[in-house]
Amino acid sequence: MQAEPVIQTRNLTKVYRDFWGRPKVRALNSLTLDVRPGEVFGLLGPNGSGKTTTLKLLLGLLFPTEGEISVLGKPAIDVGKNERIGYLPEESYLYRFLNAEETLDFYGRLFKMSKEQRRQRSDELIKQVGLDGARRRQLKEYSKGMTRRIGLAQALINDPDLVLLDEPTSGLDPIGTREMKDMILRLREQGKTVVMCSHLLADVQDVCDRIAILYGGELKVMGRVEELLTDQGETELLTSRLSPEAVKDVEAALARHGATMKKVAHPTSTLEELFLKTVEESKLRPGRRYVPGGDGEGDKANGDRRAEPVKAASPPVT
Amino acid sequence: MSFDAEAFSILQGITHWLLIFSAVFGIALVVAFLTSLVAGGAAGPGLFFNRLSEGAADAASTSWRRVWALTMLTYKEAFRRKALLVFVVFALLFMFAGWFLTGTEQAPQMQVKVYVAFVLTAISWLVLPVVMLLACWGLPQDIQNRSIHTVVTKPARRSEIVLGRMLGFIGIGTLLLAVMGAVGYVWTLRNFPAPSETLAFDADADPDREETYEISATLGTRINVRIEGPDGQARRFVAANDAELASLMAGRYPAPVEEQARELVRTLRERNQPVLVSRVPVYGSISFTDREGNPVERGINVGDIWDFRSYIDGATRASAIWEFDGISHDRMGDALVLESHFEAFRTHKGKIDKAGLEPGEETLTCQFTLRNDLRSQTARALAVGKGFTHLEPMIRQGAFTPVADELARIADGLSGRKLTLTDEQFDDVAQGFQDFVELLRPFENKPAFSGLVASARRAAADARSAAEEASLERISALPSSLTGLSQDLAAQSRELKARIDEQTRTSVSKELAAGGKFPELADAVAAGELETAAAQLQQLAENLLGGEGTVDSAGLAPLAAGLNKLADTLEGMQRLPEADKLAALAADCASAADDSNPQALAQALEALAGGFRERAAELEWALADLNVPLSSFQVREFKENLTPVRRTIVYHDDQLNQTRTADLYEDLVHGDKLKIVAQCLDPGQLLGMARPDLFIRTPDRPFASGYFKAVLGIWLMMVLVVLIAVTASTFLKGPVATLLTFTLLILGTGFHPFLSDLVKGDVKGGGVLEAAYRIGAGTAPTVPFEQSTATEVIQTSDRVILGGLWGVHKIVPDFNTFRMSPWVANGFDVPWSTALLPGLATTFAYLLPCLLIGYFALRLRELEAK
């Protein structure tokens, strides 16, 4: 038997009105979806497609024009449900005059947490999101990435069962993005339900179990990521390096089976992977730098621009 | 403004609040229900009741932990947004204020007025705008920045957000006020330092022995005396009054040094009237008499447009009579201080501000008389109605035996139906006897001769000490106590003769005669010649002072025994013995007359006549008219006139043509009432008086008492501003919320009195439309409005508009309630019942409505910045 959905919406509609009560924008139109416990659910769509509106309706920040919402078995406007919810807003709308410790302590106070629990949990989260060195700085001095991190920490202060993330990777550098995605996957491992909305498709693809694509306030596609992305009409082979003759043989073999070879190429890494690899290497071997036209290790003919060791006399470039 | 405001009735206030609150809340509910019906159709009522029940559930699950978290957040926000920079402005103001406020030509009281008004106004004008802006912008900024999203998506209730915000801003305001209030207080004190003086006193006449003492005294809220001896060692004595100072110093220094220190304090006090005080006035009710002494409602109108005061004629029987309630020794202490502010109206010229102070200037003399007119009141009570009026001359003479006989005769007349009374006459009689009962009530356990008992005991103690210790110092104290006793004895000899019997006199005489030293005194007492006994005692005092006479210290023991015996006899004596029984008999008469029952009244009158006969002598003394004139004084116009009244007053009785003493609390205060009569003594001059022009000053409170109560008043106002501002910010943006709060502040401060008058119909010229019509038609406001259909429509419409204004008037808070600085600036303490309590009530009245509006405004809106 399937577990009770964590989130359930039925014909959820939101129409924004002007001052005189006249309909202005139909931001969401008859959305019906279920989010199951323990899954990472992605809401995808271009700007203005209704992703954030959906999240705000789920949180009770907006009131639906029509339809029903149930979050953790309670109506969206029930404040009691918030005990088990964590929310990271699109921008980190935190109190900029507080520092990281004060921020987490303040949000911790809003839950039934003792002083000791708050202290322990804050300490743990600050380390987890990598703000240990900036815990006493006021948030107004934080970079955007740091603000997102403290935003995530505040969303997790109460160890929630349901985490709602609005554009979780926006403003983060690739490392931060990767860490955020790792964190989402860890949350899934812990059995939490995560709902995230984003327009960064790669991020969604990496972490989501199921996705829903919204366009113009309407649900267009919903399902498991791998099911939606798999093209059953084509087959992809990945082999070790083939000589041109071997390629011809493969082509001939395919022709015998009535298939055609559409593309032969060397696989490329993603830019994200390249970036992360470079950063990792830099951490392991500090003092190396890229010198244009220098005697680096790479193959210049192929445009390889890897960093080379810095000579002893040269100061390190940071 | 008047410092004689009416006491606030908290019960009436609560009832009034409940009425207004229920009405407004009821209207809001009906409007909300109808709106839900229109907007939601059939589902509307369900939604309406859901919201109400959610509100109740939220209120029930309010967590003070979360409220505190939001309070602290608000506090930190203001703190880190540098709201406390207002202290810099405050400091700058106070650094340079002295330049503009100091005016040496002004009297100290006027300077205090300027300084205190400046301090309290500066504090108000710095704290209120800062707190108002913070409170108006806090929540809207949270909504604008969407920071509130991170709070409302936690389990924080909207009510907790509103409450937390309110408490946070109140906390900031409190901090600002506490610091500014304390700094302002210290600043004011520093500008008016306590008078201080130092003298060097040589205690020894021998020039070879340099025994010089340096004595410093400072008069603040307490007396501070420092004495440095010839050995360089110094001691400090801090006392509340002279007696405490004397007991603190007793025996530590040579007697002349102690006396010199006390003298320095006295001199300092005489030279420096304290300017920083909180006076506590007791106001009375006023009535007037005309030139012939007949009671009138008001004095003479001298044509002053402002008819606040009315005038009494000089050198006639015209007077103003004040009756004060609640006068007791516990409240007032041993001495009373009367403070008066009278205005003169002169029929011949003079320099009004120097009257009587320079030769040739016109004087303006006023005299107060303390009056206890029990006999007149008895006459007014009993000699009323048909058949009773002829009692008046007898009562006025104090002849209570004939009064008793007359009462018995009236009783006969009533029972024999020779005297018949109408119902109205019965009512008059009943009221008269009821008044008499009230007159008798304070006599229960009212002692007689307590002053005499005290002086006899004092003299006996001094005599016994002198006898036992043979101490020179004690003997030196005896003459003064004997003199006091002699005066008291002489003053009350008539009453004593009436009240002590021969047996008592003999037993006292025996004690006095025991040592054989005072035969003449013993004889005089035995014979009941108390004036002679008083003279003997005076003679003895003089002999002791002069070192003459035959009395050695051991021989004083019989004197001590005799005086103690006298004190014992007088100790338990009541001024009117068994007054309760007489009161009960009079009450029976009142009740019988009330029932219009002639037979029962006859019986009751018989019984009362018996009581009168039995107690005729005591009644004559107890129910006496006593007029004790105080020394006359020159009226200083535009300044306060202080008249001290000691507990024991020595005065000249014109009727008896002798000097007598009266005890303030025993002889003049009856129950807890005291009557003071003011008269002008100068012919051709008139003195203007109104109820608040004379008051009794109970012991002054420290300046801090009034000052900090005024700061508390500003605090209450600040709290109310925060409540309104936060409430407005739940449904309005920052600038609009500020505008609304500011408008309410202005409306509630400047226009509330006008709004009040308008609603009450006290404004001439009618309502809004009528006034507009009059302007158009060029009709004066005082001209009666013509009657036509059009004018009727106008007036009806005005009544509707006035109804709306009545609502506005009830809803807009009256910020004038919090204005307490005039009290402090004018040297008064801020009274709880007339100033602070209304302020407290006003603030608390808005707490619940503001919370409700704030909660529902935040609960029913989408928290999206638009």
Image (spheres, coloured by chain):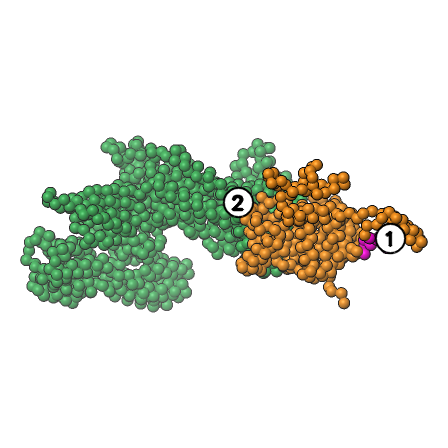
- Let me know if residue A230 is in the magenta part: yes
Packing grade of label 2 (10 A; few <14, some 14-19, many >=20) is few
Q: Which chain is orange?
A: A
**Chain letter for the residue marked with disc 2 in the picture:** B
Residue B187 horizontal side relative to residue B148, left or right: left
* Residue B249 x/y as whole percent: 22, 52
Query: Which residues lie in the magenta part?
Result: A227-239
Q: Secondary structure at mark 2?
A: helix
- Let me know if residue B747 is in the magenta part: no
- Residue sitting at 30 percent across and 49 percent down? B222
Query: Is the residue B119 above or below the residue A57 in the image?
Result: above
**Viewer-nearest of discs 1 and 2:** 1
Q: Are marks 1 and 2 in contact (CB under 8 Å)?
A: no
Q: Amino acid at mark 1?
A: Glu
Q: Amino acid at mark 2?
A: Arg
* Residue A93 x/y as whole percent: 63, 47
* Residue B155 x/y as whole percent: 61, 57
Chain B pictured colour: green
- Residue ID for mark 2: B80
Q: Nearer the viewer, residue A43 or B376?
A: A43
Query: Is the residue B59 above or below the residue B310 in the image?
Result: below
